[in-house]
Amino acid sequence: MKILVIGNGGREHAIAWKVSLSENVEKVYCAPGNGGMAIENKCENVALDTTPKLLEFAKKENIDLTIVGPEVKLVEGIVDVFKENGLKIFGPGKAAAQLEGSKSFSKDFMKKYGVKTAAYEVFQDVELAKKYAKDAEYPLVVKADGLAAGKGVVICSSYSEAESALNEFMVDDVFKGSGKTVVLEEFLDGVEASILSITDGNVIIPFISAKDHKQIFDNDEGPNTGGMGAIAPNPYCTPEVLKEFDEKILMPTLEGIKKENMDYCGIIFFGIMITKKGTYLLEYNVRMGDPETQAVLPLLISDFTEIILSAIDGKLKDIKIQWKKEAACCLVLASGGYPLKYETGREIKIKNNKSKVFAAGAIEDKGVLKTSGGRVLALVNTAKTLDEAIKATYNDVKNVEFDNMYFRKDIGTLYK
Ligand code: AMP
Ligand code: GLY
């Protein structure tokens, strides 16, 4: 089989690596890929990014399966285009991708199908939104409706903060259309978990739970990033939490997908909040998480390519997904200054490394690996216990070197 993986992050490196391990896979093209994917066994980067170019390539090379990493392409509708051309592609169609592409759409879907989620109101008129915010309880969560590269959520502790966020989103239009509609939402106090799952539209199977570490600094301080590390399974996901997740979130979601006749064969990522009042759904993502994927996939025993093909053939009901009875730790090594200003083009040296390395903001330049982004690499280890996985990962940091390397020292520490 020839597979095409679309994307260039750590998540896509992990996906390309995992599918490359299948015996039936002969070649994995990565579009555009990164410096780590370039040297992964069976993998080759191709410098393509637009949907028409990807389609042309997939047809010309007789690609057997395309896997889409990032949400933007899914929301744009790449799946519909590939399917219309008779190509196999893994991911939801454009209409179903609105579960991530529009927060008002996804909240209305949750409400309609009884998925447990925070109370909310949707506004298109800034004055009405401000009026509602004036009388609301604080903290209040202000969310831009559309995609905003992870920057569209503000937790406001007072009306004046909410007013500024509403002005930025709705009047100044900082997200170029994505914030013209807003969702104002009840604040939930608790701990977060990420649960990826796979569905073929009839059956949904959750993966091992994971925990992201979003803030840049230790003790969960500082601004949010794309994720500074992850562990799996998530220690807060007790059997009770998972039972409630199954009954109040997972199953009602599947019910909604069926009833709405959604074209959904792909990954659904549930971002949940575990609170004293129970477990709530914060959001859906219609793709795998980054860096959750880098922690979760190394724990998968079953053949990932076969699982994806079963989903595409509508045969998920026939398979059982097996996981290692171990824990994983993924540590992101970033360029100093990220998520604000940082330098790129620095040489990366890796020696005597024992961890699995997934590249993100790293490119190959004339045979030399160089930094090209904020989150540069991730080191991942699995072990019998989480402590061992954490220790093995941190032990390996000394084997990676680039100027101004920054990483959190506390991945895996639980604060609540
Ligand atoms: P979202 O894009 O909806 O997942 O929001 C991004 C982040 O904002 C989440 O991962 C949470 O940390 C936080 N967040 C979103 N909604 C809420 C809420 N209702 N209560 C508390 N925190 C929230
Ligand atoms: N780690 C969060 C996300 O991928 O959205």
Image (cartoon, rainbow, N blue to C red):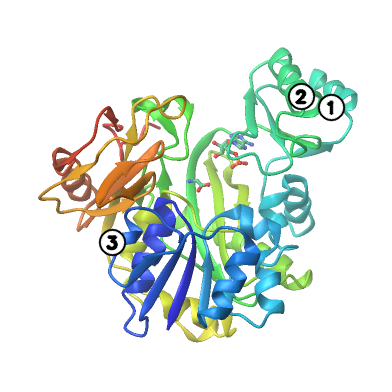
Within 10 Å of the Cα at label 2, are there few (<14), some (14-19), or many (20+) other Cα atoms?
Answer: many
Q: For the view shown, which residue lies furthest in the top direction?
A: 160
Residue type highlighted by circle 2: Leu
Asked whether residue 238 appears in the rendered view, the answer is no
The residue under label 3 is: 39
- Ligand 1 - quadrant of the structure image: top right
Q: Looking at the picture, does residue 141 appear above or below residue 149?
A: above
Q: Nearer the viewer, mark 2 or mark 1?
A: 2
Q: Position of residue 200 (x, y in %)?
A: 60, 76
Residue type at mark 3: give it. Answer: Ile
In this view of the protein, which residue sits in the foreground, 302 or 308?
308
Question: What is the total number of numbered labels drawn onto the structure image?
Answer: 3
The answer to whether the beta carbon of the residue marked 2 is less than 8 Å from any atom of ligand 1 is no
Q: Are marks 2 and 1 in contact (CB under 8 Å)?
A: yes
Q: Which mark is residue 166?
A: 2
What percent of the width, then of the height, locates residue 232? Answer: 35, 53
In the figure, is residue 123 to the left or right of 100? right
Disc on res. 129: 1
176 lies above or below 6: above
Q: Residue at x 63, y 63 (%)?
A: 51
Of callouts 2 and 1, the N-terminal one: 1
Residue 154 occupies which quadrant of the picture?
Answer: top right
Which of disc 3 and disc 1 is earlier in sequence?
3
- What's the residue type where badge 1 is placed? Ala
Relative to residue 7, is residue 259 drawn left or right? right
Which of the image's four quarters has the N terminus? bottom left
Residue extending farthest to the front is: 366
